[in-house]
Image: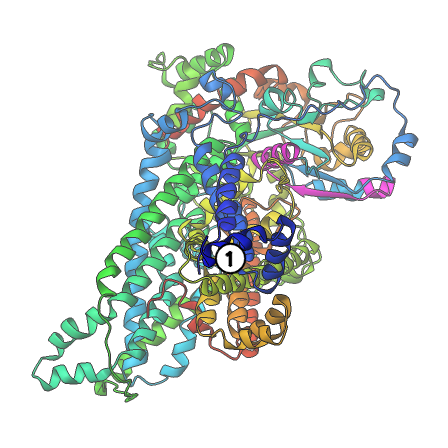
Amino acid sequence: MQVPRSALAILVTGLLLSVACGGGAPAGTSAPTAPTIAATTEPFSEAVLLAAAKNEPPLVALNNSGIVTTLAAEFEKKYGLKVNGTKADSPTQVQQVTREVQSGNVTLGVLSIEDGALVQAQLIPQKIVTNYVPPDMAKSIAAEWQNPLVQLWDAKVIGYNPDSYSSCPITNIWDLTDAKWKGKTSIRDPLGTPEQITWFSWLVADDNAAKLATAYQQKYGAALQTTEKNAGYEFIKRWAANKPITGKSDDDTAAAVGAPGQKDAPVGVMSLGKFGEAPGKGNKLAVCKGVTPWIGYAYPRYAVMVTNTPSPNAAKLYLHFLMTADGAGPSINDHGGFSANTDVAPGKNEFVGTRDEWQRSLVFLAPSGNDRGWQLRTPLTDLWRLNKI
Amino acid sequence: MTPTQSALAAAGRLRPSLRGRIAYRVRVAQREPTTLLGGGLALLLLYLVVAPVVSMITDSFVLQFGDQFVTGGRAGDLTTYYLERAFTSPVSGLLFWQPLAHTVVTAIGATLIALVLGGGLAWLVVRTDMPGRNWFATALVIPYMMPSWTFALAWITLFKNRTIAGQQGFLETMGLQPADWVAYGAVPIIVTLGMHYFPFAFLLIGNALRRFDSQLEESARVLGASAWRTTMRVVMPLMLPAVLSAVLLTFSRVLGTFGTPYVLGLPVNYSVLSTSLYQSFRSGSTGMMALLAAVILVIGITVIAADTWLLREQRRFVTVGAQTGIERRARLRRWRPIALLLAVLAFASTVIVPLGTLLISTLMRIPGRFESANFTLDFWIGQSIPAFVGFPTGVLRNPGLYSAAWNSLWIVGLAAIGCGLVGLLIGYVVVRAQGSWLAMFLRQVSFLPYLVPGIAFAAAYLSLFAVRRGPIPALYGTMWLLVLVLLVAYLPYASRAGISAMMQLGREPEEAAQISGARWWRRMTRIVVPIQKGALATGIVLPFISGLKELSLVVMLAKPGTDVLATLSVRLVDYGYQQLANAAVLIIAAVAFLATFLAQLIAGSSLASGLSGPGSRT
């Protein structure tokens, strides 16, 4: 059958169209200029927000921690509004929110995300998320924790297995890089956990690097010789080369360190929540106190609203809820930490200790370091990647 | 003027008006819309098949947002940053060259295992008098019906060692420490992939052996050739197309497979191209993702092209002869028990051991401890499992599982039905417009998704539908993207089924209907579709079953909260909730088995014949 010219014409047009559309703007250049949600200078009225929220679709909230299901239940009990809370790690949250906002099909409402560096350096300037501080709390939250909004502070510390050791076998952070602990340290894989790379970016800051250098001197008796820029880079490099056991989540680390009955269990860096969950899972875990210069790091969990969310009023109500004692309680009463809202009392269980002990023994990943964290992200990731055995 | 000339001049003056001509064409098109239909299908395929691939390739050369400050350029500029990073930078070895080498190694290894296992078993079942062979003919296809990473999870449950964080493996709890190369890396990946894909070889070579005319063999023997010579000079060359098809199918599936290397390779940084692509996706490096997808595509095309070229020789001759139907089976005599043992071992190690391991692990709180206190049904029907914060109830009580199952069913179902219908339509156009280049175009382009290994195809769709382009909306975030990607990815199967079915249907029934006045739509619904029920069923059922357990295509497109079963299972692996992940995978396997048996009942045909796939030349 002879091909009519009409078919040819259709095909040629189709080809041209597909090339034009296929080679269209790359994702990302067209970040929407959405109008920012009304500034937080308006007074906070719970009743008004609640009334408006009742007409909105259920809020979708993502959270690094699985505690989100408890938070959603508590919120529903308090306000009668349904929240779909799902646990999702930082890269997943970023991927999803970025693609949704760019494509215009936004379903998400609130992100409780720990990757502050990316939020501050990329998501907020690109107007993919919007910062919202509940107006009635603006005075009780420290100014430097308001943009992006910090919900609470949690920590990741070095833990050991009491079945294997009567007390913490690590006394100096450089032990993690020592041959004695080769293949016996554990950490969540930095390549999939941007928050950990932010921690590394704090370790290479001048003051912290100096502390590391001093700690090295204390352990080995001699000054550190390194070709890297400072002691921080050297520490990261040596640790990567010391065969650390990496896993996809802190649960994996907790399982490796805490499996009962081990004679020479590894030590590992994991979040405080794992110490709380240990009895329920049959793990044996205890916090290593007294490691020079730090036992781990304190990190903030940020809470931001998604631009163009279909449930903005529910989102604001939820953010307000997160900053109250009810919103922080499930986490801080389980394993410690503290809310960024000074009106909220500290939690019941504490694995690290008082606020002073927190300051003394942990590196605080303050929002002021987020820009540096973002800039150093690729170089530090590559440093780990190239040296990891 | 001559009478002819004046007649022609008169006819010219009587030429119908433009409106008249259009009206005429419309009436013809209503009766015989093949060209219009073909044109529409061609346009559709251009956008759904060609455009994503083009978009993916161009994204490798355009600076993506997020990487601006690294190079100092602006998003949208042309750049060689990704090429440099992948091919020449200090991290290129880790990001590209090693994964490439690993991909080739695992693909070759898995293909070899699949060939040996599948081919050997096929010979035993088809050409010998091994006891129980009819049962084994269906039983040995079961490994393919399970999700591909079932074997990986079972392996990890058994052989995990201390290199990676997480719960201990069974052997570890019993005091044995599996060596590093046993627990993770190349060997487990090759073995588990071989176990999953050997049914392809089994079916293809089995079918070929079944149709092999034993008279040829007997002639050779009568003429004095030894058994060995006969096999080498008569049987093997004629088996070559089937063997090559099996190699091709397995190799290209392994190229794009994601689940197994994710579980067994990534934890020790044994990366293959598909997991490297996934890592780039996760870290937001869409440029690197596009580049790796393009490389996978190129390799896939090369493999298919090589196969086509190799088979060109084979197509030059055809054995002409009657099918005698004499079943000539080799007598095994004293080897019978051993053959049976081998087949039983194969079945046990590829079906019973993996499924059994997973099942037992879901019943144990601490893996590997065979104490009665350690056994629990919590992971299946527990009201609340306190320490598992992100998924706090047993699998069968969790609404998340049921919503994922429902999503799986409706998304895959819709995609399968659409796929079957479009495949039949393509078959119709290709056969009715035979010889035209519209037909050739449709035939080739509908086959193109076959060349794009799973995860690369998903990456291409992600990059194409991420933003609105002209009149086409951005589909990211909707479930329709999943429906579309599954529909197009399985189109090769449906269109092949459609084409071969339509080739066997002559024009006569349709023409008779046309003469009686039936319009095209009526002819399709009352004549063509009912006659082609079988092909339509194959075109729907096969994608349905494959889609249920598909991971590579959906892992990057599903979102937390709107999961399908496969992505839910991977999410549970990521959380470290091993027992729950194993339970989820068992559920997928059960659903896939159920669907297969139901389909076999309804379609009344053996699925084995359909599984031979479009690459089959026998």
Name the chain under label 1. Answer: B
Picture coordinates of residue A247 (x, y %)?
Answer: 48, 40
What span is colored magenta in the figure? A75-103
Q: For residue B174, say whether it is visible.
A: no
Query: Is the residue A358 above or below the residue B616 in the image?
Result: above
The residue furthest front is B1
The quadrant the N terminus of chain A occupies is bottom left
Q: Is residue A84 magenta?
A: yes
Which residue corresponds to the image point at 47% horizontal and 74% vertical from the top-left? B505
In the rendering, at what x and y percent does residue A279 appear? 62, 46
The answer to whether A382 is drawn above or below residue B436 in the figure is above
The question of residue B601 being in magenta is answered with no
In the image, taking residue B517 as reference, residue B220 lies left or right, namely left
Which residue, given by chain and number where applicable, does mark 1 sit on? B7
Q: Which picture quadrant has residue B590?
A: bottom right
| Amino acid on which the number 1 mark rests in the picture | Ala
In the rendered image, the vertical position of residue A357 relative to residue B505, given as above or below:
above
